[in-house]
Amino acid sequence: MVLVLINYTKPYEQVAAVVAEHRAFLGKHYAAGTLVVSGPRATKTGGIVLARGKSAAEVAEIFKQDPYALHGVATHEVIEFDAVKHAPGFEPFL
């Protein structure tokens, strides 16, 4: 699995102008089966995305096309990890 930490690099007002494009980008990758869950941090300093079935390098390539990156309002930290434990029922997302 791959965790993506999105860190805003511009004031939230500038980020907000790109949110609709960002969510459309995410929607495309949900439809492709790559993403499991995503959402903004409660602090409005970035977001979190959980992806499956891809290496960190593949996910990093995907997120180079995130409108947040293209508009220069955020960076992406991509972390690959082994999901060795999970809640019952989470298997379809692995």
Image: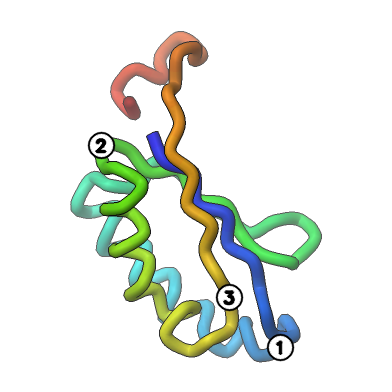
Dot 1 or dot 3, earlier in sequence: 1
Under circle 3, the secondary element is: strand
Q: Is residue 41 left or right of residue 63?
A: right
From the viewer's perspective, is residue 43 above or below residue 12?
above
Question: Residue 13 — which label?
Answer: 1
Q: Quadrant of the C terminus?
A: top left
Mark 2 Cα-neighbour bin, 10 Å: few <14, some 14–19, many ≥20: some
* In the foreground, 61 or 40: 61
Q: Position of residue 55 (x, y in %)?
A: 29, 42
From the viewer's perspective, is residue 9 above or below residue 28?
below
Mark 3 Cα-neighbour bin, 10 Å: few <14, some 14–19, many ≥20: many
Type of amino acid at the residue the image marks with label 1: Glu
Write down the residue under mark 3: 74
Residue visible at 34% across and 29% down in the picture:
93
Q: Quadrant of the N terminus?
A: top left
Question: Residue 53 — which label?
Answer: 2
